[in-house]
Amino acid sequence: MSAAARVKPEQFFSPDEWRLLSARSAWKGIALVVHCWLVIAAAMAMGVIWPVTIPLAVVLIGNRQLGLFVLMHDAAHGLLHANRKVNDRLALWFCGAELAVYRPYHLQHHRFVQQTEDPDLVLSAPFPVTPHSLRRKILRDLTGQTFFKQRFGALADRLKASSTDGSGQAWSLVLAEAKKQRVFLISNALGLAALSAAGFWWAWVVLWLLPMATWLPLVSRLRNIAEHALIVQNGTDPLRHARTTHANVLERLFLAPYWVNYHGEHHMFTQIPCWNLPLAHRILVRDGVTQRMEVQGGYRAVLRLASAAKTV
């Protein structure tokens, strides 16, 4: 296996710039986690008080569920807090992920980004697709099919195989899957209990599970497409292993939270916390570096490229 080529920060930033860009913070990551949950709580309250706004609330909450993943991703790099123990606990308790599982997988993605050994290559390799194929994928996302397949598909397949071969392992398979997904199950049980105690049990279904089953899969797919689709596989240029996509206010509000769109900069400089990626981008623009990078003007432009395959 050959790791992907890397860049050295000193080739692009002065020592003072790099010190500023790569500095860990004792409060910024916490503030972003609090912000994310406040937006979710406000959108939930809006949906409860004014049911007519539930579709908007679903979109806002689904996007902030992606936001929790983005912040957890920063924690996987040790960037969410200056103290590593606090960093990891923030990811577990408030972003809903065990880094012991996610971190090794994700760091392998970085080490072999867009190389044959990249575990995430399967997400970007199918593109471009036809417009019809992209619409089918979006429909599966918005109808919950993607969520079910990702969350319960493996268990459903194992249960089906167990019933076919007569091994009678169904209960043990369910228990094993519950242990694997214990963070998801416990956090959702606690959320349901809290809202039920307040008399709004239905809000957990409509204003948490529904966004998770519909809008979150869609924006996660769009993020994956924007970050690595149509990027050359086994390429040697470290400036073109990932894509940066400019995002306007609405795209940041509904699709791309917490500067996740600066993915090219993130892969070039994994030591930069998400809140400093826009500054890194501005410095690279100033020095003409972005002309050598893969940069698109918006998510619509990326989707046009991703759905440019012709029907055979």
Image (cartoon, rainbow, N blue to C red):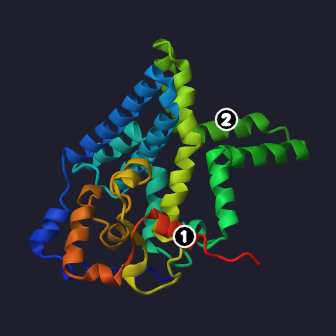
Foreground tag (1 vs 2): 1
Q: Is residue 107 visible?
A: yes
Furthest residue in direction bottom, as rendered = 236
Q: Nearer the viewer, residue 11 or 45?
A: 45
Give how far across and how far down residue 7 sits, in percent: 30, 80
Whether label 1 touches label 2, CB < 8 Å:
no
Residue drawn at x 53%, y 26% as measured from the top left = 204
Give how far across and how far down residue 146 sits, in percent: 65, 50
Q: CA distance from mark 1 to mark 2?
A: 43 Å
Res. 304 mark: 1
Q: Nearer the viewer, residue 1 or 221?
A: 221
224 displayed left or right of 161: left
Up-down: is 247 above or below 163? below
Which residue position holds label 2? 175
Give how far across and how far down residue 137 sits, in percent: 65, 57
Furthest residue in direction front, as rendered = 52
Q: Is residue 97 visible?
A: no
142 displayed left or right of 197: right
The quadrant in which residue 288 appears is: bottom left
Local SS, label 1: helix
Q: Nearer the viewer, residue 236 or 88?
A: 236
